[in-house]
Image (cartoon, rainbow, N blue to C red):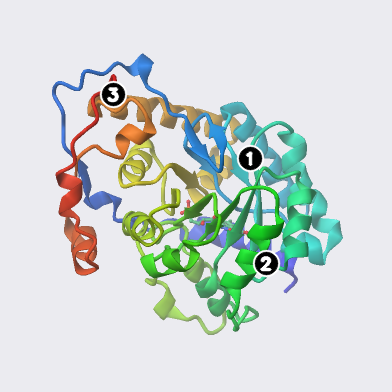
Amino acid sequence: MSRAERKIDHIHYALSTGQSRRTGLEHIQFVHQSLPGSSVTNISLSTEIGGLQWSSPIFVNAMTGGGGEATARINTQLAEVAAACEIPMAVGSQMSALRHPEERATFEAARKANPDGIMMANIGSEATVKEAQAVCEMIDADFLQIHLNVVQELAMPEGDRDFRGAVDRIAAICEKVDIPVVVKETGFGISSETAQLLSSLPLAAIDTAGFGGTNFAAVENERATRPLAFFNNWGIPTAVSIVETASGAPEHTVIASGGLQYADDVVKSLALGASAAGLSGFLLNVLLTDGQEALVEHIEQMKADMKMMMCALGARSISHLHSVPLIVSGETGQWLQARGLKPERFARRTPVPFDS
Ligand code: FNR
């Protein structure tokens, strides 16, 4: 099977396997405030990542390109939606365009459709500095995402089997690429040990891409003649991974992703310590099922709903959300307890007054 055919397969199976929604966010509860002292009109959703101001923490996370015309069309549509909603967007892994230059247009389509928006290039941690520079240049990127996908590669019969040297390659890329770099997982979550290995690198952010959303072990297992079923339930749930990442790399900005669909998923992720939230599979599903207008509507609705929730919580900004009290229960609480990450500290936080 060619790389281009595989890209189409990924879209097909990502949609059919769906999102388990076992993100751990179901174990997070806000503590209601009856006197929040807030007003919806004074709430700001803006956030700063890598020195750039984003008007909202929501963004379209990496998905596609490299699968011919069908993937060019999806990137065009996603980029048009990102432009309409003024949110950043990442394209999928551009390695295919380096190996097969005829696929460049499938990524360039995104930049063409959204010439002024924040656009992220994407490549795996196997990339060289030259390859990283080439993918940034290809779409005139504002950010570079470097993805980690060990489990997906192992689950793929034709996948990589040698993962040595990744941290050194990421460090070399950070040194030579002149735009902010984000390291992301691809649905299995970042642990505090992984975050610690990344903590000394000059990264703009670490993106959790936790378990509970699109599951690339399940996707590859659908394609494989000998499925590795033990990977289907492998991974760190998104809620846990946000806390693990912040604990391993406390100086770094955390981006939440993995299974996020609605405003409450995003607000809970931000309250756990993230500064932005990426959505992939769910947005693709809305786009391909209901179309571009429906996707714009969904994103605008999410933004409006986030403001409603923040108003009820008395949080004027994303940084205010970082100090609202939360109850962390169930398996998420048990996991954090077992890892010494003190879930009870979230319950005892003091909210920042709305007007300060
Ligand atoms: C992805 N994802 C992804 N990530 C990446 O860094 N490079 C890539 O090329 C791709 N390709 C890709 C294709 C498709 C069809 C999907 C749905 C996803 C992973 C994605 O960015 C994200 O980390 C995970 O999908 C988890 O988030 P969701 O889908 O649960 O919101």
Q: Residue at x 33, y 38 (%)?
A: 264
Report the side of 60 relative to 319 (left or right): right
Confirm if mark 2 falls within 8 A of ligand 1.
Answer: no
Task: Name the residue carrying label 2.
Answer: 6
Q: Nearer the viewer, residue 182 or 187?
A: 182
Report the side of 87 relative to 214 (left or right): right
Q: Nearer the viewer, residue 166 or 265?
A: 166
Task: Name the residue carrying label 1.
Answer: 78
Q: Is residue 82 above or below residue 247?
A: above
Say which label, 2 or 1, has the lower sequence index.
2
Q: Is residue 230 above or below residue 52?
A: below
Report the side of 6 relative to 166 (left or right): right
* Residue 262 in picture, x, y percent from top left: 39, 39
Contact (Cβ within 8 Å) of mark 3 with mark 2: no
* Amino acid, disc 2: Arg
* Amino acid, disc 1: Leu
Image quarter in which the N terminus is found: bottom right
Q: Which label sits in the foreground, 2 or 1?
A: 1
Say which label, 1 or 3, has the lower sequence index.
1
Secondary structure, mark 3, is helix
Secondary structure, mark 1, is helix
Secondary structure, mark 2, is helix
Q: Residue at x 61, y 27 (%)?
A: 84
* Residue 45 in picture, x, y percent from top left: 43, 28
* Amino acid, disc 3: Cys
Task: Name the residue carrying label 3.
Answer: 311
Q: Please tell me in which quadrant of the rendered image residue 79 appears.
A: top right
Q: Which label sits in the foreground, 1 or 3?
A: 3
Quarter of the displayed picture in which ligand 1 can be seen: bottom right
